[in-house]
Amino acid sequence: MERISRTELSSKPFSADAKLRMFSDIVAAATKKQLGSGANWRTERAVRTRTGVAWAFNGLVYFTVALLTLTHGSKFTARTTNEMLTVWLLAMLQIYLIIEPVQILVIACLPMLCDQSRPRGRCCTAVKRCWHDVFNI
């Protein structure tokens, strides 16, 4: 691929087809350079193994916490355990039926409130932090 300076590019009128060919040459050269540089040095098997190990670790953490919760709950009476489970259920319902949908609606319907380059966006971020601190205890 020949190298063309910026002054040559600005002085020559190119057709759309010629520009497209030049662009595809640039993309092909960049792809070849990336593949040759070893940027993708992990094999597919290594990626799948790492992903599997990560998911197994997450599952192990989940089941460990569940086991500890059941062990802790077994020290209480049946009435106390039922009250504790009821409170947990109410907390989950509050999170998934009230708080999450409101957050999704605010973020999806009012994207200008999430723009960090404007004062409104920074204010919304501060309000969101307070919201999480108050309701996600």
Image (cartoon, rainbow, N blue to C red):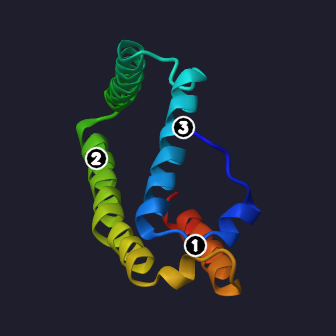
Among the two numbered marks 1 and 2 on one chain, the one whose residue lies closer to the N terminus: 1
Q: Residue 44 location, x and y as percent?
A: 36, 18
Q: For the image shown, how many numbered marks are present on the structure?
A: 3
The picture quadrant where one finds residue 16 is bottom left
Question: Which residue shows up at 48% across the image and 80% down it?
Answer: 111
- Extreme residue toward the front, this view: 12
Amino acid carrying mark 2 in the image: Leu
Question: Which residue shows up at 36% across the image and 66% down it?
Answer: 100
Among the two numbered marks 3 and 1 on one chain, the one whose residue lies closer to the N terminus: 1
Tell me the residue that label 1 is attached to. Answer: 13
Q: Is residue 74 left or right of residue 133?
A: left
Tell me the residue that label 2 is attached to. Answer: 85
Question: Which residue shows up at 42% across the image and 23% down it?
Answer: 54
Q: Is residue 131 left or right of residue 71?
A: right
Tell me the residue that label 3 is attached to. Answer: 29
> Depth check: 21 or 40 in front?
21
